[in-house]
Image (spheres, rainbow, N blue to C red):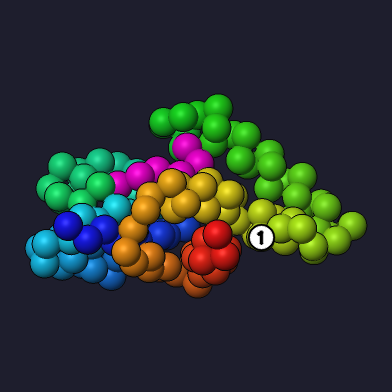
Amino acid sequence: MKKVVLISVGQPSTNPRLVKEANTLTASGFDVYVIYSYWTKWAWEADQLLFEQVSWKPLLAGGSPFKNKSHYFFTRLTVKIFSFLAKEVTFKFGIAEIARGRTYLELLNKAKSIKADLYIAHIKASLLVLNKHSLF
């Protein structure tokens, strides 16, 4: 079975197009993984209900206030540090990417951990992950 990875910096409940695509790909016989990041509490609650109804595999990157709390707060601290570095020192060496996205590294690492036939970025910010992933 062919694998497809959908990458989003947001939560599935905040992106109906992502959910529709994941459902369609799954119904078409693909093994689908959705890598996503925590954004807001209302969507977290909606996601939990959604995940009970879908066949694709949701993978949280970067934790949340409800799951992997310490990782979530570490990523928030990391963004603050890298935002300062980007503003005061340089945009090079991946600093700008990390400064712009709390879960950039986590999304990248999860995407790299899945050998798939196709990777699809949802929301413009996810393109950074996809672009970096294609280099490895």
Q: Residue at x 46, y 29 (%)?
A: 68
> Which quarter of the rendering shows the C terminus?
bottom right
| Image quarter of residue 135 | bottom right
Q: Residue at x 35, y 44 (%)?
A: 59
Q: Which residue is mark 1?
A: 97
| Image quarter of residue 28 | bottom left
Label 1: which secondary element: helix
Label count reads 1
Identify whether 33 is placed above or below 78: below
Residue 19, x across and y down, in percent: 24, 62
Q: Is residue 23 visible?
A: no
Q: Nearer the viewer, residue 96 or 73?
A: 96
Q: Residue at x 42, y 60 (%)?
A: 8
**Taken as a whole, is the magenta stretch helix, strand or loop?**
strand
Residue 37, x across and y down, in percent: 45, 49
Residue 82, x across and y down, in percent: 75, 50
Q: Where are the magenta residues, as a range?
A: 58-63
Q: Is residue 48 left or right of residue 115?
A: left
Q: Is residue 87 left or right of residue 98?
A: right
Going by the numbered disc 1, the residue's amino acid type is: Glu
